[in-house]
Image (cartoon, rainbow, N blue to C red):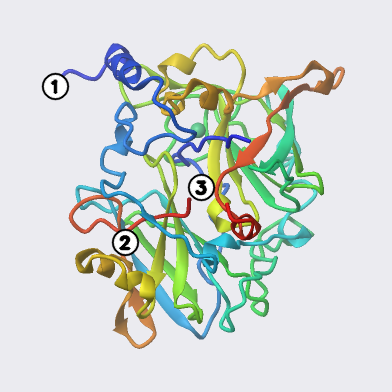
């Protein structure tokens, strides 16, 4: 069957998609943060990032409960802090910044899906936290766009450039 | 100051790209001006790894939604103004298999074409009884259902006199992260279709038709609501698909 086409997320998803604690997959692990930039080098204040990753033992089974709700008033309670759901969602701030708190998956990378106003079809990339054969297959000047830089112990920086000289490597899964 | 872009300028640009094949819009679709600085210029890098994490994906459960989430007319003390509708359909993968128990999220303008959002300054009234946000999980056959009101068209600033056709934004998950989809559903017969660079970014006519819901009279509820049907097919490989040696 032919797929339903993609359309931009637009600017007005704010009441629908982001939720409190969306970037807090786990405590006591690492923090990854950065900016999203456009082709002029300006920060993108209305991007939405989603994250998917294995737990610290390598399981990709995930778990429900990312959006766990309060049955009394419907408010979002979020993750229970015990089950690792593997899924995160963060809207960039007005300055284009985002933060994710999680654990290091044994396969060494966190999958990222990028949505934004002006982006008609989402983009996939990966945050690598160490060396990897896939990284070795890329030209050296592009490889670094996928590697998170350790700023201090447990805190990594990962910027996403949608376009331009430092353009991030985006992925095609076929 | 340069002359503001007119609809006629955008019409010409849309015509120049019309008919380009493809199921999805090209990211470098200039008639939608916000794409200019927000699309990559390097080609995407292919990953053909049967172990890729993206061949699996997030899961959701009954605790992630409430029974009221899929009725956007029942989220406040009063009922919203507008034409009450139901929108239903199935979420399928490219093999036609239902996507079961997955999260469907929607958001939309109110019947006057205004979003509840601080950045929406269109001078149309807000509706105190309408947030315009819904969620549900698909059932075992991949069905979803929302009760809402028909959103109004609204102006935007892509060019002078730019108006979006009425639409509902949809967000969908499959069984793999690669199947993730965010899109927009349109209503049949909207006279704004040819003027809208976002809808026309799907340059393939048959693909574009797949963004338009059907009005189905048998799905209308007497003296209550008008019924629309819109099935959604998710793209992208899954773990089982890879095993089958696609
Ligand atoms: Fe919209």
Q: CA gap, disc 1 to disc 3? A: 33 Å
Residue beneath the point at 59% across and 56% down? B245
**Horizontal and vertical percent for residue A54?**
56, 74
Few, some or many residues within 10 Å of mark 3 (<14, 14–19, 20+):
some
Pointer 1 with pointer 2, Cβ within 8 A: no
Q: Residue at x 23, y 48 (%)?
A: A39
- Along the viewing direction, whichever of B157 and A59 lies nearer the viewer: A59
Same chain for mark 2 and mark 3? The answer is: yes
Crowd class of label 2 (few under 14; some 14 to 19; many from 20; radius 10 Å): many
Q: Position of residue B99 (x, y in %)?
A: 71, 48
Q: Name the residue carrying label 2.
A: A35
Q: Label 3 near label 1: C-beta < 8 Å?
A: no
* Residue A34 place in picture, x, y as percent: 33, 66
Q: Quadrant of the N terminus of chain B?
A: top left
Hey, which residue is sitting farthest front in the picture? B245
Please name the residue shown 46% across and 26% down the image.
B199
Task: Examine the image and state in which quarter residue B213 appears.
Answer: top right
Q: Mark 3 highlights which residue? A: A14
Q: Which mark is residue B2?
A: 1
Secondary-structure class at tag 1: loop
Q: Quick one: which residue is furthest to the left in this view?
A: B1
In space, the residues marked 1 and 2 are separated at their CA atoms by 32 Å
In space, the residues marked 2 and 3 are separated at their CA atoms by: 19 Å
In this view, A52 is above or below A151: above
Q: Secondary structure at mark 3?
A: loop
């Amino acid at each position: 069957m032919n797929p339903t086409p993609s359309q931009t997320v637009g600017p007005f998803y704010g009441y629908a998609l982001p939720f409190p604690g969306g970037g807090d997959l786990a405590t006591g692990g690492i923090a990854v943060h950065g900016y999203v930039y456009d082709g002029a080098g300006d920060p993108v204040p209305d991007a939405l990032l989603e994250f998917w990753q294995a737990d610290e033992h390598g399981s990709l089974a995930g778990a429900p409960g990312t959006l766990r709700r309060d049955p009394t008033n419907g408010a979002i309670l979020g993750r229970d802090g015990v089950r690792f759901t593997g899924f995160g969602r963060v809207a960039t701030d007005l300055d284009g910044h985002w933060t994710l708190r999680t654990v290091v998956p044994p396969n060494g990378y966190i999958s990222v899906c990028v949505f934004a106003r002006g982006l008609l079809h989402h983009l996939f990339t990966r945050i690598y936290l160490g060396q990897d054969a896939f990284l070795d297959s890329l030209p050296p000047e592009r490889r670094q766009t996928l590697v998170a830089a350790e700023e201090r112990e447990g805190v990594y920086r990962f910027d996403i450039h949608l376009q331009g000289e430092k353009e991030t490597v985006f992925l095609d899964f076929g | 100051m340069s002359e503001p872009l007119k609809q006629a300028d955008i019409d010409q640009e849309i015509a120049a790209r019309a008919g380009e094949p493809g199921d999805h819009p090209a990211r470098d679709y200039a008639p939608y001006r916000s794409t200019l600085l927000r699309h990559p210029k390097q080609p995407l890098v292919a990953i053909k790894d049967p172990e890729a994490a993206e061949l699996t994906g997030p899961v959701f459960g009954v605790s992630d939604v409430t029974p009221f989430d899929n009725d956007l007319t029942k989220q406040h003390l009063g009922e919203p103004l507008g034409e009450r509708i139901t929108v239903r359909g199935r979420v399928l993968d490219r093999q036609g298999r239902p996507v079961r128990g997955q999260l469907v999220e929607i958001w939309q303008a109110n019947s006057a074409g205004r979003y509840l959002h601080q950045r929406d300054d269109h001078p149309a009234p807000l509706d105190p009884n309408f947030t315009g946000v819904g969620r549900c999980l698909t059932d075992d056959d991949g069905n979803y259902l929302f009760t809402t009101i028909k959103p109004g068209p609204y102006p935007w600033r892509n060019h002078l006199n730019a108006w979006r056709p009425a639409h509902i934004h949809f967000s969908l998950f499959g069984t793999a992260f690669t199947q993730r989809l965010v899109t927009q559903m349109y209503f049949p017969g909207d006279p704004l279709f040819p003027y809208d660079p976002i809808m026309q970014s799907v340059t393939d006519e048959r693909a574009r038709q797949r963004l338009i819901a059907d009005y189905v009279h048998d799905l209308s509820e007497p003296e209550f609501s008008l019924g629309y049907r819109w099935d959604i097919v998710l793209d992208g490989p899954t773990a089982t698909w890879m095993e089958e040696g696609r």
